[in-house]
């Protein structure tokens, strides 16, 4: 081959050098573009506190060393930007679309607002976009479909609205994860999502989506997780979903879906771990094949219309941790239907069991004491079950919530209940329980709530309850308890919601320690035989809203320092032996809505200041010894005779009271 002439060789050498230099300049320009884009991003954001956001982002160092920035090995271009959980705020600047080599963008758990910039459509190499847990609004940009290499789209927990673009399924066919949960998206699920054959995780929960669930989702042959909960979906759950053999989690809670569960579900979804159909309108029987779901950890079918018997071998799913069957029409009685309880003893990791609000009847199964020691929450109330609480209930050492309410369960609360050292909530109301309240309840020092009202419990209230230093609610009303109220109970400053011991046979004075209940909202001691004066210390209960002491034998005057309880809305002191005048001090309680002082021995005039209480709508002064002119303003404008009757020396007032004019009584 002939040699190349020297002149031509020189020209080619110069041309090659020029191409290399141009390429280097091009790379350098892109580097500069990335740095400029990052600085433009920084300008548009802010963060609370004295230190500004992203302090390491300055021109004195290479942007590849900046916080949250990752550059590619050879190109020097930005390939990842991860600023999650940095407390950043502001709007996302369009300049972010200039980072054209970006593969990962994670700005989750910040305070960004405004819309998602359309410039993100220029990020053709983007694979992961995570903007979750911000305050972004607007709609999903259509040109996001240009990011054809995207595998993860995570936009949950924002304020995004509008429709889900059909282009999502038409062009982003490499997606493996789509999470749009907890937004305000509307409309139907696009049928095009069926094209996402690589999709493994789909979460559209907590939106305002509606219509039927597309049967074409059977095309999601790689899917393992579907969550469509808390939307407005209706119609039947497509049977094709039960053919997705890799599905491990199906959650459609909180819609208006209907239909039945296929009889062969246990054979069609062999990998299923979490099946959540609760709070819909599903009906029919729970198929026996559910027991073939050997990997099942959560079965939530509550608050539907399922009927019949629970599959007797449900406990074959030995990994079951969460079983919710509450709020259905499931049946059992002494002859059959309770066998599933025996099998649940095999579920040694069971933590949550809800069987309440069904049609279960007969004796409370003794096998309940064989349930897992890991069981933390057990609900079986609102059924027509009977029998007694077994003494071996103490076997359930992990229990935190025990609810056996609104049943026909009778007998005594076993002393062994005091061994449930982890118990936080104890619901035993509306039953036929009798006998003494065991002092061992005082050993349950983690208790927050005791609701044992409307039973036949008797005897004194154990002073040991004073050891329950975390107690927020104590309601033992409507029983047959007697004796005095232990002073120790009034020293429980943790009581912040309610102390209700009403309608028992409690006696003795109200101790001055009542003033220690400085965090209490409701104090209800009505319908007892309490006597003595209402202690002045009650004014220390400064956050009290409801003070109900009616139907006792309290005497003396109404404490004037009740005015210190600025948030009182209801005061009921009727049916006592109170005397003296109605104090003007009520005028200082601007929140007062209802005041009941009937059937006492109160004397003197009605304080005119009561008409200044603009929220007061109910005032009962009947059957006292009040006298003088009835005011006509405020609550008195609409007062009728029954609220003032039994006070023969009252006069005047509005015409509907039909009282004599004051001039005739006091000429």
Image (cartoon, rainbow, N blue to C red):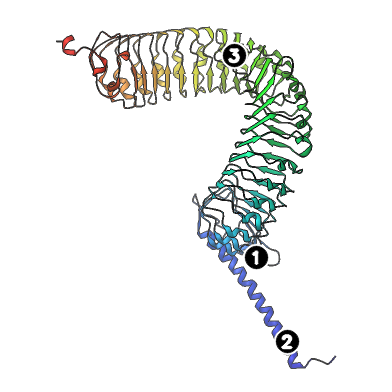
**Residue 639 in the image: x percent, y percent?**
30, 19
Q: Is residue 332 visible?
A: yes
Q: Which mark is residue 431?
A: 3
Q: Using the image, determine if residue 149 lies above or below residue 190.
A: below
Disc 3 to disc 2, C-alpha distance: 99 Å
- How packed is label 3: few (under 14 Cα within 10 Å), some, or many (20 or more)? many
**Residue 479 in the image: x percent, y percent?**
54, 10
Residue for point 60% across, 58% down = 144
CB atoms of marks 1 and 2 within 8 Å: no
29 or 294: nearer the eye? Answer: 294
Tell me the quarter of the picture where residue 367 sits.
Answer: top right
Query: Which quarter of the image is occupied by the N terminus?
Result: bottom right
48 or 23: nearer the eye? Answer: 23
Specify which label sits upstream in the sequence, 3 or 2. Answer: 2
Specify which label sits upstream in the sequence, 3 or 1. Answer: 1
Q: Using the image, determine if residue 124 lies above or below residue 445.
A: below
Residue 89 lies left or right of residue 568; in this view the side is: right
Residue matched to label 1: 77
Residue for point 37% across, 26% down = 566
Disc 1 to disc 2, C-alpha distance: 30 Å
Marks 3, 2: nearer the viewer: 3
**Residue 211 in the image: x percent, y percent?**
59, 43
Q: Using the image, determine if residue 163 lies above or below residue 655.
A: below
Q: Which mark is residue 12?
A: 2
Local secondary structure at mark 3: loop
Tell me the quarter of the picture where residue 331 sits.
Answer: top right
Query: Which quarter of the image is occupied by the C terminus?
Result: top left
449 or 178: nearer the eye? Answer: 178
Residue 230 lies left or right of residue 551; in this view the side is: right
**Residue 219 in the image: x percent, y percent?**
72, 49
């Amino acid at each position: 081959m002939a040699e190349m002439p020297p002149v031509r060789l020189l020209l080619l050498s110069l041309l090659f050098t020029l191409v290399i230099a141009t390429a280097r300049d091009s790379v350098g320009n892109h580097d500069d573009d990335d740095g400029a884009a990052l600085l433009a991003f920084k300008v548009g954001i802010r963060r609370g506190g004295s230190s500004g956001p992203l302090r390491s982002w300055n021109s004195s160092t290479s942007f590849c060393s900046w916080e949250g920035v990752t550059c590619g090995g050879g190109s020097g271009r930005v390939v990842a930007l991860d600023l999650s959980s940095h407390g950043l705020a502001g709007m996302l600047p369009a300049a972010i679309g200039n980072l054209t080599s970006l593969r990962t963008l994670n700005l989750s758990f910040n305070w960004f607002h405004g819309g998602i910039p359309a410039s993100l459509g220029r990020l053709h190499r983007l694979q992961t976009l995570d903007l979750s847990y911000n305050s972004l609004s607007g709609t999903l940009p259509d040109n996001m479909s240009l990011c054809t290499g995207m595998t993860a789209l995570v936009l949950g927990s924002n304020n995004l609205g509008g429709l889900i673009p059909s282009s999502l399924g038409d062009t982003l066919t490499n997606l493996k994860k789509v999470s749009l949960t907890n937004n305000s998206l509307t409309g139907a699920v696009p049928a095009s999502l069926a094209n996402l054959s690589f999709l493994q995780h789909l979460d559209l929960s907590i939106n305002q989506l509606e219509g039927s669930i597309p049967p074409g989702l059977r095309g999601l042959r790689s899917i393992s997780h579907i969550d469509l909960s808390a939307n407005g979906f209706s119609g039947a759950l497509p049977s094709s979903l039960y053919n997705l053999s890799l599905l491990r989690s199906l959650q459609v809670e909180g819609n208006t879906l209907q239909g039945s569960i296929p009889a062969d579900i246990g054979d069609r979804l062999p990998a299923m771990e979490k099946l959540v159909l609760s709070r819909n309108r599903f009906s029919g029987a729970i198929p026996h094949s559910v027991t073939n779901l050997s990997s099942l950890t959560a079965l939530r079918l509550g608050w539907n219309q399922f009927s019949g018997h629970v599959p007797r071998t449900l406990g074959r799913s030995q990994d079951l941790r969460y079983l919710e069957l509450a709020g259905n029409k499931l049946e059992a009685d002494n002859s059959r239907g309770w066998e599933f309880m025996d099998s649940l003893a095999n579920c040694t990791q069971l933590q949550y069991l809800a069987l309440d609000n069904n049609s279960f009847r007969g004796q409370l199964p003794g096998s309940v004491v064989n349930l897992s020691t890991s069981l933390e929450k057990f609900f079986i109330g609102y059924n027509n079950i009977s029998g007694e609480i077994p003494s071996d209930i103490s076997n359930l050492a992990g229990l935190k919530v025990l609810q056996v309410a609104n049943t026909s369960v009778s007998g005594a609360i076993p002393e062994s209940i005091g061994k449930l050292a982890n118990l936080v909530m104890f619901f035993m109301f509306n039953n036929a329980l009798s006998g003494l309240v065991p002092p061992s309840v005082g050993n349950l020092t983690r208790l927050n709530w005791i609701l044992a009202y409307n039973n036949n419990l008797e005897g004194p209230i154990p002073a040991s309850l004073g050891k329950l230093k975390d107690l927020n609610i104590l309601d033992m009303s409507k029983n047959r308890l007697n004796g005095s109220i232990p002073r120790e109970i009034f020293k429980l400053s943790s009581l912040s919601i309610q102390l209700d011991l009403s309608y028992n046979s409690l006696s003795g004075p109200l101790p001055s320690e009542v003033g220690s209940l400085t965090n209490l909202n409701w104090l209800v001691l009505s319908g007892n035989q309490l006597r003595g004066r209402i202690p002045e210390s009650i004014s220390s209960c400064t956050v009290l809203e409801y003070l109900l002491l009616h139907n006792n034998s309290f005497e003396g005057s109404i404490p004037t320092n009740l005015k210190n309880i600025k948030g009182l809305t209801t005061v009921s002191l009727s049916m006592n032996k109170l005397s003296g005048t109605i104090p003007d001090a009520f005028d200082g309680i601007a929140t007062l809505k209802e005041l009941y002082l009937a059937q006492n021995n109160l004397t003197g005039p009605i304080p005119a200041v009561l008409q200044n209480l603009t929220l007061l709508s109910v005032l009962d002064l009947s059957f006292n010894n009040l006298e003088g002119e009835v005011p006509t303003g405020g609550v008195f404008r609409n007062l009728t005779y029954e609220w003032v009757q039994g006070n023969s020396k009252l006069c005047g007032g509005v015409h509907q009271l039909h009282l004599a004019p004051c001039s005739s009584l006091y000429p």
